[in-house]
């Protein structure tokens, strides 16, 4: 299965075809017999998924310093992360546990991407019905880092944790904000320019 991950195989049939095409080299790779889909499926069932999750974290910790100096299009020394999710449609007949809508199954993959090297530092797969904002409870903000997310993550009570951790976040505005910045007032030039937001009561 490690071979399949490292060579970007798409499924059991793809793994089987790839390994059989390398028949003369399989012995040196540790295979002592014919590889079939059923064998691979049994191996998947027998091995705890946490083995691969922990191994992925080791690889991520090794890879991130290698790409820390990569340009990202902005002059920023701190870490820059993008947080988003994608819904993966599934067949309801094959995955009844992943019920999403009446006639549809799905899971949702939440990803926190380090834009220095585009390396995922956090991935969580949940039920398709889990709202994006709930994932903020599982993320531990990095001091000084910047987090970019869409308005699906706007929950100021949860985002306040980022401020307490000395992290920064940027997000598009929610559809129905309870307050907004209506006027930006320039401050005197006796110190570095800043803007004082005036928030009208609603």
Image (tube, grey):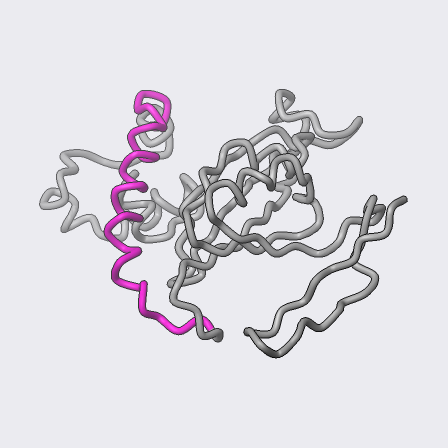
Q: Is residue 147 above or below residue 188?
A: above
Q: Residue at x 29, y 30 (%)?
A: 51
In magenta stretch: residue 54: yes
Quarter of the figure with residue 185? bottom right
Report x, y in % for residue 138: 50, 32
Q: Which residues are magenta?
A: 44-72
Report x, y in % for residue 26: 16, 45
Question: Is 50 left or right of 31, judged from the image as shown?
Answer: right
Report x, y in % for residue 177: 81, 47
Question: Is 187 left or right of 49, judged from the image as shown?
Answer: right
Work out whether residue 132 or residue 181 is closer to the camera in this orientation and state it: 181
Report the quarter where the C terminus lies.
top right
Work out whether residue 117 or residue 169 is closer to the camera in this orientation and state it: 169
Q: Is residue 5 above or below residue 71?
A: above
Q: What count of labels does the image hold?
A: 0
Report x, y in % for residue 104: 73, 32
Q: Residue at x 59, y 40 (%)?
A: 160
Magenta stretch, main secondary structure class:
helix
Question: Is 148 left or right of 47, judged from the image as shown?
Answer: right
Q: Is residue 195 above or below residue 46?
A: below
């Amino acid at each position: 299965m490690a071979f399949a991950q490292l060579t970007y195989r798409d499924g059991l049939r793809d793994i089987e075809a790839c390994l059989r095409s390398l028949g003369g080299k399989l012995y040196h790779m540790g295979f002592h017999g014919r590889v079939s889909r059923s064998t691979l499926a049994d191996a998947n069932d027998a091995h705890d998924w946490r083995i691969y999750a922990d191994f992925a974290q080791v690889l991520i910790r090794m890879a991130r310093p290698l790409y820390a100096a990569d340009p990202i299009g902005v002059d920023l020394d701190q870490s820059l992360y993008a947080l988003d999710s994608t819904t993966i449609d599934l067949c309801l007949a094959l995955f009844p546990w992943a019920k999403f809508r009446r006639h549809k199954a799905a899971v949702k993959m939440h990803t926190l991407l380090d834009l220095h090297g585009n390396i995922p530092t956090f991935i969580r797969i949940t039920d398709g019905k889990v709202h994006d904002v709930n994932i903020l409870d599982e993320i531990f903000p990095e001091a000084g880092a910047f987090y970019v997310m869409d308005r699906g993550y706007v929950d100021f009570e949860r985002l306040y944790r980022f401020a307490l951790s000395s992290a920064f976040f940027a997000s598009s505005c929610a559809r129905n904000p309870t307050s907004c910045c209506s006027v930006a007032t320039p401050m005197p030039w006796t110190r570095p320019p800043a803007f004082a937001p005036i928030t009208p009561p609603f």
